[in-house]
Amino acid sequence: MSQQDFSGIISKHRPSLDAYEDYYRDFHRNPELSHAEDETVETILEHLQELANKAKAIGSGISVENIRSIGGTGLCSVIRNGSGPTILLRADMDALPVAETTGLPYASGKRMPDPKTGDYHPVMHACGHDMHMTSLLAAGQLLLSAHESWNGTLILLFQPAEEKGAGAQGMIDDGLYDSNRHKVPVPDVVLGAHVLPLRAGTVFTRGGDLMSASDSLKITLYGRGGHASRPQTTVDPVVMASYIITRLQTVVAREIGPQEHVVVSVASLHAGQAENVIPETAELKVNIRSFTPDTRKRAIEAVKRIVSAESSASKATKPPEYETLSSYPVLENDKDCTAKLAEGLGKHFGPMFQLLQEALPAGSEDFGILGSGIDKSYVYWGYGGTDPELWDRKSKEGRILEDIPFNHSSNFAPVIQPTLRAGCDSYAVAALTWLVKE
């Protein structure tokens, strides 16, 4: 069977997406922070158990095994359907500490404690992981229904803690593929996708580098506190932090050329609790994005040099302290596997599929570790989630950057359709690319 037949298989076996739209709304309404995706896991497992029951009813050598508690809350569903390749499809599960402002009837109003600090935060699926989970569940149902069209082993993997850059490595470290531990079969190819604020219904990828490396640092600055009326007797860490933030803006363009695709952002500054007390410390959280080992090294070194120099210039009472919060590698798609997948995506989605010429703008992902950690190839792709009418109107007005919310925005919420259908279909195309019967 050729790749030209994928659309027929998918059209015949795609389940009604009405129920999955309800799944999506439930996931969106009930987000959970990294390493605390417990209720999310239970919801997924209910659906995966239904798949296992359907597989038992089918018989014919097909089976579904669900494996949980991998690297914490991670889980896999292993669908065995005769001899053939082993393919892994991945979706991430965690949400972000963001207060949702979409105004949707299914918006999150949830608050929960950070598993590490215990501090309570508002929580929102502001990066689309709710859509990823829903799309993969729908694709799992589609592919189980289409079992007569393919042979091999299909793994549906639901990963925790992507937003911390720790979930993929955590699953591997806990024995994801270990034959004496969780016993998930080693895949021949690892496949995954992400919804992005582009026109819904579109799908896109590229071979080679697709997403940047990311390094996040928590930096603690040390001053000497005192009364706000006598700042001359203090070493003010707020002023110290202000100079550092300003100076860090010169790393790109004044130290590393803008053509080298480096981003340095200070996204959090915390110091003190009262307006009349100069605090002892200030805390910065800095994020650095890069695409090559050299620029990654230079950018991190530049940040630390500037922080240390400004601390010294401010007469800090002790040197700054650095804590690595997360670290993601460059996501680099295998070129041969990408070309193979692109053929299937192009035939199924037609003009709505695009093979990109450049990498996506400095987003980062730990997905690739699920493949690179065992020396296996991986391919990642994206699909749009912005209402087509809104996208077309804002494109005509030249206001996409101003009016289309990006991932991690409190207003980010993919339009459910045609986003869900594109996500489901793209996962199915990816699996069939390697598993379809000849």
Image (cartoon, grey):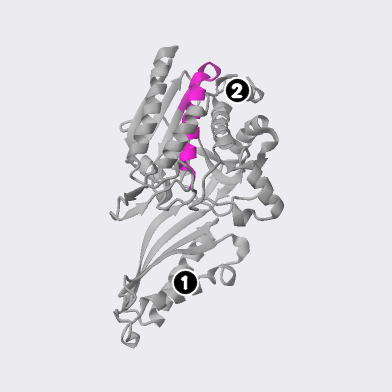
x, y percent for residue 333: 56, 43
Kindly identify which residue carries mark 2: 11
Vertical order, 403 against 58 (above or below): below
Tell me the quadrant of the picture where the C terminus can be found. top right
Q: CA distance from mark 1 to mark 2?
A: 53 Å
Circle 1 or circle 2, nearest the eye: 2
Task: Name the residue located 68 percent from the left edge and 46 percent from the top edge.
Answer: 392
| Residue 309 is one of the magenta-drawn residues | no
Tell me the element at label 2.
Answer: helix
Report the amino acid beneath label 2. Answer: Ser
Vertical order, 91 against 210 (above or below): above
Tell me the element at label 1.
Answer: helix
| Residue stretch rendered in magenta on the structure | 127-154
* Category of crowding for the residue at label 1, using alpha-carbon neighbours closer than 10 angstroms: few (below 14), some (14–19), many (at least 20): some
x, y percent for residue 418: 59, 35
Task: Name the residue located 68 percent from the left edge and 50 percent from the top edge.
Answer: 395
Kindly identify which residue carries mark 1: 245
* In-image side of 70 versus 267 (left or right): left
